[in-house]
Amino acid sequence: MRRPLVAGNWKMHGTRTSVAELLSGLLDACRNCRAEVAVMPSLVHLEQVFQALEGSEVVLGAQNCAVEPGQGALTGEVSASQLLDFSCTYVLVGHSERRQLLGEDDQQVVRKFSAVQSCGITPILCVGETLAERESDQTLNVVLGQVSAVLDALGVQAFSRAVVAYEPVWAIGTGLTATADQAQQVHAAIRQHVAAFDADVAEKLRILYGGSVKSTNAVELFAMPDIDGGLVGGASLNADEFGAICRAAGN
Ligand code: PGA
């Protein structure tokens, strides 16, 4: 049985004041939630969120890390080992905003995935197709290709300590959501792809859906057999809305 996970990706949002407000609402809204709940603040708020989460069941994550796991001379970057110092449980790797807008390629994604795992943190590997790719029937090629980049480089066992997030690029921040059936189809394909290498790893692998998840569509999405929770952007900045999504995942 896979425990659902809901991760709030705060992206480049927040001030110390707004983060404090969001946290206090969120800790209330997520109390006794059956799903695992994670929040991923901007790095400048990591210390603040780390302190606020102490004693709560909500865990901390980061949105990115350097390709090298250890500390070193790499101006402006943050290493997975530094994230471990804040007890980060998860780190996103390969988010589409980084792939599309910052030119991150599969090779860098593999290195970050490996850096995160080498520090004992769980990577959340983000994969997803653009609208043009979906319209030209390339969805599975693209998504399974992104999964394969990690599989080929690090082997299937790497997925026994990882989470995958399927996030169609056209659904991120647009208000457009994949239908539950569209998402389920891709989630099932990802699981089958991993199962071809190791059925047990595939069965235990949590695959999250991301892309305009809201309290109004969460129940239907999370009812799908291969959708094990969500990666939530915009809606995670509202404590009540995020709490409702977490409850939907726990039911
Ligand atoms: P969204 O973002 O929920 O605002 O669409 C999801 C994500 O990018 O992780």
Image (tube, rainbow, N blue to C red):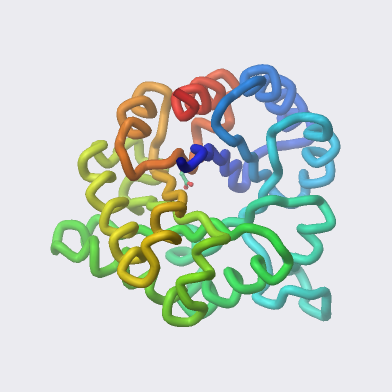
Give residue 164's position: percent from left, percent from top.
46, 56
- In this picture, is 122 found above or below 45? below
Give residue 227's position: percent from left, percent from top.
37, 42
Q: Quadrant of residue 9?
A: top right
Query: For the C terminus, which image quadrant?
Result: top left
Q: Which one is nearer the viewer's eye here, 214 or 174?
A: 214
Farthest left residue in view: 136
x 71%, y 32%: residue: 57
x 68%, y 17%: residue: 28
Give residue 85's position: percent from left, percent from top.
84, 57
Q: Which one is nearer the viewer's eye here, 3 or 13?
A: 3
Relative horizontal placement of residue 178, taking residue 6 as reference (left or right): left
x 69%, y 71%: residue: 118
Relative horizontal placement of residue 181, taking residue 247 as reference (left or right): left
- In this picture, is 77 found above or below 51? below
Give residue 105's position: percent from left, percent from top.
47, 75
Farthest front residue in view: 200
Relative horizontal placement of residue 182, taking residue 225 as reference (left or right): left
Label tally: 0
